[in-house]
């Protein structure tokens, strides 16, 4: 079972993605509603992978990714950044902040699952 930490402040997005991933039977989804809680949960729960919205309250996704990379407990957990801003340069900024991959919102489920599996496979 792959443990996914989804850091997202929109309850509808969390509900939809959690439900759809868990229907696949090989994902367990935990959720945090802001970057601060996400960093704390990553350290305590040790997820296999993190899905991180970049536009978050308290601590944004960019800063949360940097904090996760600086913490020895969480630095090796892959992070997939999610953003509604598909602007040129967003992907590079996300990778520079410590994210392993970048995907756009609204989430295209099949593509996201393929990205999750690819990033996880690269870590094995």
Image (cartoon, grey):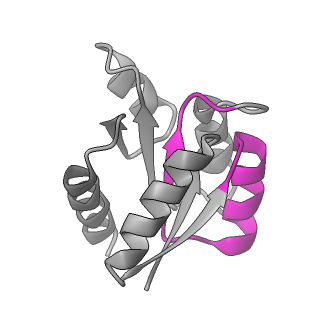
Question: For the point 42% across and 75% down, which residue is it?
Answer: 22
Q: Horizontal and vertical percent for residue 97?
A: 51, 32
The image shows residue 2, relative to residue 110, as above or below, that is below
Relative horizontal placement of residue 103, taking residue 16 as reference (left or right): left
User: Magenta segment range?
Assistant: 32-56
Viewer-proximal residue among 87 and 100: 87
Question: For the point 31% across and 76% down, which residue is it?
Answer: 124
Relative horizontal placement of residue 27, taking residue 114 as reference (left or right): right
Q: Horizontal and vertical percent for residue 78?
A: 45, 57
Question: For the point 21% across and 59% down, which residue is it?
Answer: 114
Relative horizontal placement of residue 35, taking residue 14 as reference (left or right): right
The image shows residue 64, relative to residue 25, as above or below, that is above
Viewer-proximal residue among 59 and 67: 59
Q: Horizontal and vertical percent for residue 25?
A: 36, 84
Question: For the point 32% across and 14% down, which residue is it?
Answer: 87
Viewer-proximal residue among 21 and 72: 21
Quadrant where the image shows the N terminus: bottom left
Tell whether position 44 is magenta.
yes
Q: Quadrant of residue 34?
A: top right
Tell whether position 106 is magenta.
no
Q: Quadrant of residue 63?
A: top right
């Amino acid at each position: 079972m792959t443990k996914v930490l989804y850091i997202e402040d929109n309850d509808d997005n969390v509900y939809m993605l959690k439900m759809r991933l868990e229907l696949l039977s090989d994902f367990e989804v935990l959720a945090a509603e802001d970057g601060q809680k996400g960093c704390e949960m990553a350290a305590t729960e040790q997820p296999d992978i993190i899905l991180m919205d970049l536009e978050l309250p308290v601590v944004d996704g960019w800063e949360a990714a940097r904090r996760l990379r600086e913490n020895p407990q969480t630095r090796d957990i892959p992070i997939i950044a999610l953003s509604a801003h598909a602007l040129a340069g967003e992907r590079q900024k996300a990778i520079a902040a410590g994210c392993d991959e970048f995907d756009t919102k609204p989430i295209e489920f099949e593509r996201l699952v393929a990205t999750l599996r690819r990033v996880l496979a690269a870590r094995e």
